[in-house]
Amino acid sequence: MRLFRRNLQSGHGSAAGSDPKRCPVCGSTSFRGDRLTCTQCTHGDRHRAVFAFYELIRPNLTNRRALIFSGENWLQDDWFASCERSFYGIENHLDVQSVDRPDESYDWVVCNHVLEHVENDVAAIGEMRRILSGDGVAQITVPSPARKLKTLDWGYPNEEKHGHYRSYGGDMLRKLGSPVMAVVVADGLTTHRDVLFLVARSERPLYGLADRLRNKLICLMF
Ligand SMILES: [Zn+2]
């Protein structure tokens, strides 16, 4: 699998004093489209916003056993003590609604833009909590959760909506249960803002992350 490593050639900006936009994931300065999709690593605004969060919390990850659903090849295996990846339909595919792993197998689960593709998202959230250790955290994002109050659930994979079962609203917080921390993340290259959710079994690891993020990103605990 291809992972991207940042290519920091000259630190911030360029020697000539101009300040080209540089992809924080791979170091490229070539982009396309309004959302500034990187032409080298193909990551866009939403990936960079979550990547910026990970850059801040990396010291909190080194002892964690991670499970990563879907691609997320901007996340490096060596940020974690161990790292297992599940790829839909290909190698090592785990069904997030029924994860074929023992209780408390992981300390960090990554589930970005997956829940909208599964029929039973409540089961998936329950499974993520089950496989987490007591100090574990599941990091979750879904498309545009902050634009409406109530989730629109079609009950089937709507092919006119990218095959999604539903379009989430703010009420997804109730589905995520408690404790959960919502973090407002930002892409430094565009004006894109997103909300990232951290689901845990106890509030203790969330306090640790909130402490790390203090005065950097807005965190709300529920
Ligand atoms: Zn890039």
Image (cartoon, helix red, strand yellow):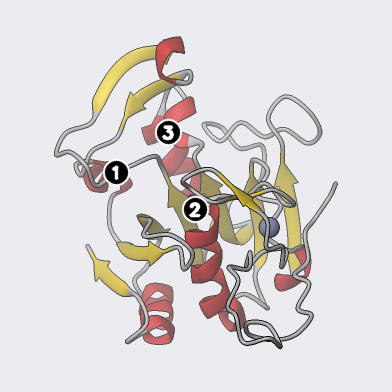
Residue at horizontal 74 percent and vertical 59 percent from the top: 83
Q: Residues within 10 Å of mark 1 (few under 14, many from 20)?
A: many
Say whether residue 204 is left or right of residue 86: left
Image quarter for residue 133? Answer: bottom right
* Circle 2 SS class: helix
Q: Is residue 158 visible?
A: yes
Query: Where does label 3 land, which residue?
Result: 123
Which label belongs to residue 45? 2
User: In the image, what residue type sits under mark 3?
Assistant: Ala
Residue at horizontal 58 percent and vertical 51 percent from the top: 103
Query: Where does label 1 land, which residue?
Result: 145
Marks 3 and 1, how far apart at CA: 19 Å
Image quarter for residue 3? Answer: bottom right
Query: Residue 213 at x, y = what percent?
Result: 40, 81
Residue at horizontal 53 percent and vertical 43 percent from the top: 33
Quarter of the picture for ligand 1? Answer: bottom right
Q: Is residue 129 visible?
A: no
* Circle 1 SS class: loop
Q: Earlier in the sequence, mark 2 or mark 1?
A: 2
Say whether residue 54 is left or right of residue 154: right
**Front residue (pair 142, 9):** 9
Query: Residue 137 at x, y = what percent?
Result: 48, 63
Image quarter for residue 4? Answer: bottom right
